[in-house]
């Protein structure tokens, strides 16, 4: 009944959307675009899965939809009701949805945390202000993201040295800022931190390239890598976001033709922060040469792009999609992202005695791993070393087929009941890297199939059968095992099943492996320097080297100042205050001497 109810509700929503599209005389392409997730979600419901509803304000729906696309979440967008838009998703996409909401929250909140120098001075007039001096652009970007999570206001100004910046924050927010500054060092630590830093610096370099070209008054185009029909155009000090769509139009003679429409969602006064926000909304965008956008024949008074040739548009977008040498901006929200992208290998349901033997050998070789219950996870980069250990422990005294079958079972790459020794039914072994080729294993021997057609067969009676089979299987990557019935599915369904079987099977150990990042980071940020381990103190070295000074902002500085000028004025003020204090001290000393003389 639950399945029937879920399907019924979902189909009802689809019917409303279809009726609305037909009423508005939308073309088939429009319907396909808005219904592409429906088939997958319906299939998910019928197989026992559940749906989830994500609701956002209508003004934020476009950004939320882009984030769903960037995280590869299957969805259907429902109609707007009372200023709200709902998206139907699958419950199995829970992990991706958590990431979507995290990105969405950051997108909405980031504008409220960082202030311009003028805003910061106005809000903190006659208050003590702290300056953290000498941070690189990448460090400042990480600081921004940490400030969003923690929740306090700050401002960034140019430092005395080119390429370095000072971070200003109110003295009342000192504990918050200290936590964010410590997080900067933690995020850039270790291999994952270095990878994150490199990717972040590459993205910032692209943004700076855009800014440099914009200052030269050259038009700049940034195309959404997830959807080339969306792009940013920067020209004449303005940034405009464009969204193209193909629609049908009927002429006076009744003939139907396709036309291109443009929706300019928002136009910003151009600046660094506005550019950053717009690029983050796409998640990943390409900086393409002006020539690639020649399908645009001009702009109307509202700023909409004029495109007259749909075939030229299609060819141009295809060419842009295939561009690999152009500068690429890809937002990455932290070292955690690099950690989550790290390939893992898992073994599930190991016997306790086997697990003890394996982990003992891993400890001896100093190979990192995580164990929870009877599950184990380790980094894919250590796979070759771990396999050697497994052959000496878990798979000891097994022949090749038995070892292969045990591996398939523990890594969950095939059906639970698998018998490769007797092979009462044919078994099909495929690679997710190249699903065109499939190895059929039955009582007679093995047959190599290409697109279902046999191209090589070796009998089990052949003296070289075992060695040839071993070489064949060892040459295949990302293996998945299918039953005869599963192999009879449609090509599309079979490819999807192979990909699912070959993919990492998350288990309790892999969840803890990744989840340990948050726990370790939080402990690091909450620990006093003196209570830290030597390794943690080493991480703090760079943070401790930064100078933190405190000064007072007078209302005189509420006038609008540039970043560099503001930093200079603050330092001048500090020097003047220091001189005044010295004069007061000297006067006090002179008075003391005079009193002593009189006495």
Image (cartoon, helix red, strand yellow):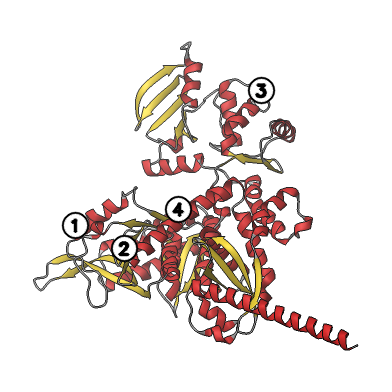
Q: Which mark is residue 311?
A: 1
* 331, above or below 271, in the image: above
For label 1, the crowd category at 10 Å Cα-Cα, with few meaning under 14, some 14 to 19 and many 20 or more, is few
Q: Earlier in the sequence, mark 1 or mark 4?
A: 4
**Residue wearing tag 4:** 202
Residue 8 x, y percent position in the rendering: 45, 65
Report the Cα–Cα distance between label 2 and label 1. Answer: 23 Å
Residue 484 x, y percent position in the rendering: 45, 33
| Circles 3 and 4: CB atoms closer than 8 Å | no
Residue at 76 percent across and 60 percent down: it is: 528
- Asked if residue 444 can be seen in this view, the reply is yes
* 189, above or below 457, in the image: below
For label 4, the crowd category at 10 Å Cα-Cα, with few meaning under 14, some 14 to 19 and many 20 or more, is some
Horizontal relation, residue 187 to residue 328: left or right: right
**Residue wearing tag 3:** 396
Q: In this view, which residue lies farthest toward the right? A: 599
Q: Secondary structure at mark 1?
A: helix
**Residue wearing tag 2:** 220
Q: Nearer the viewer, mark 1 or mark 4?
A: 4
């Amino acid at each position: 009944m639950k399945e029937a109810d879920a399907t019924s509700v979902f189909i009802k929503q689809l019917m409303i959307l279809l009726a609305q599209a037909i009423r508005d005389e939308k073309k088939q392409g429009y319907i396909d675009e808005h219904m592409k997730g429906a088939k997958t979600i319906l299939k998910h419901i019928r197989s026992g899965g559940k749906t989830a509803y994500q609701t956002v304000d209508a003004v934020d729906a476009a950004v939320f939809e882009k984030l769903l696309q960037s995280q590869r979440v299957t969805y259907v967008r429902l109609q707007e009701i009372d200023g709200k838009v709902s998206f139907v998703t699958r419950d199995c996409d829970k992990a991706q949805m958590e990431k979507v909401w995290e990105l969405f929250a950051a997108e909405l909140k980031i504008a409220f945390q960082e202030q311009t120098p003028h805003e910061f001075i106005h809000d903190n007039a006659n208050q003590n202000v702290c300056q953290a001096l000498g941070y690189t652009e990448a460090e400042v970007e990480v600081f921004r993201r940490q400030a969003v999570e923690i929740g306090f206001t700050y401002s960034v100004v140019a430092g005395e040295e080119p390429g370095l910046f000072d971070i200003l924050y109110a003295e009342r927010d000192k504990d918050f800022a200290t936590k964010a500054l410590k997080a900067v060092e933690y995020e850039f630590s270790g291999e994952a931190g270095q990878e994150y830093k490199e990717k972040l610096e590459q993205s910032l370099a692209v943004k700076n390239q855009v800014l440099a070209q914009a200052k030269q008054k050259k038009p700049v185009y940034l195309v959404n890598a997830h959807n080339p029909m969306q792009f940013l155009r920067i020209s004449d000090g303005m940034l405009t976001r464009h969204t193209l769509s193909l629609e049908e139009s009927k002429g006076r003679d009744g003939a139907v033709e396709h036309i291109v429409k443009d929706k300019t969602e928002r136009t910003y006064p151009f600046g660094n922060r506005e550019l950053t926000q717009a690029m983050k909304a796409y998640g990943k965008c390409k900086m393409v040469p002006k020539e690639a956008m020649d399908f645009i024949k001009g702009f109307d008074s509202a700023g909409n792009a004029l495109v007259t040739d749909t075939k030229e548009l299609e060819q141009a977008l295809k060419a842009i999609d295939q561009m690999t040498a152009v500068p690429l901006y890809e937002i990455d929200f932290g070292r955690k992202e690099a950690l989550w992208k790290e390939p893992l290998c898992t073994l599930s349901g190991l016997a306790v005695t086997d697990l003890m033997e394996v982990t003992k050998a891993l400890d001896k070789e100093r190979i990192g791993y995580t164990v929870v219950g009877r599950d184990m996870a380790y980094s894919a980069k250590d796979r070759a070393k771990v396999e050697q250990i497994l052959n000496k422990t878990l798979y000891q005294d097994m022949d090749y087929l038995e070892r292969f079958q045990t591996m398939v079972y523990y890594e969950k790459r095939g059906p639970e009941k698998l018998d490769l020794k007797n092979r009462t039914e044919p078994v099909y072994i495929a690679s997710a890297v190249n699903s065109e080729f499939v190895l059929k294993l039955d009582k007679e021997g093995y047959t190599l199939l290409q697109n279902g057609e046999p191209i090589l067969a070796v009998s089990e009676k052949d003296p070289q059968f075992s060695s040839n089979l071993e070489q064949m299987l060892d040459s295949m990557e990302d293996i998945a095992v299918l039953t005869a019935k599963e192999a009879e599915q449609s090509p599309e369904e079979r490819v999807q099943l192979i990909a699912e079987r070959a993919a990492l099977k998350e288990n309790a150990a892999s969840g803890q492996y990744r989840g340990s990042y948050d726990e370790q980071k939080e402990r690091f940020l909450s620990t006093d320097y003196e209570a830290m381990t030597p390794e943690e103190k080493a991480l703090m070295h760079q943070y401790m080297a930064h100078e933190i000074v405190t000064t007072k902002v007078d209302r005189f500085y509420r006038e609008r100042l540039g970043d560099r000028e503001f930093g200079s004025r603050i330092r001048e003020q500090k020097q003047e205050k220091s001189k005044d204090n010295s004069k007061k001290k000297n006067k006090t000393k002179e008075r003391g001497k005079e009193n002593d003389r009189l006495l």
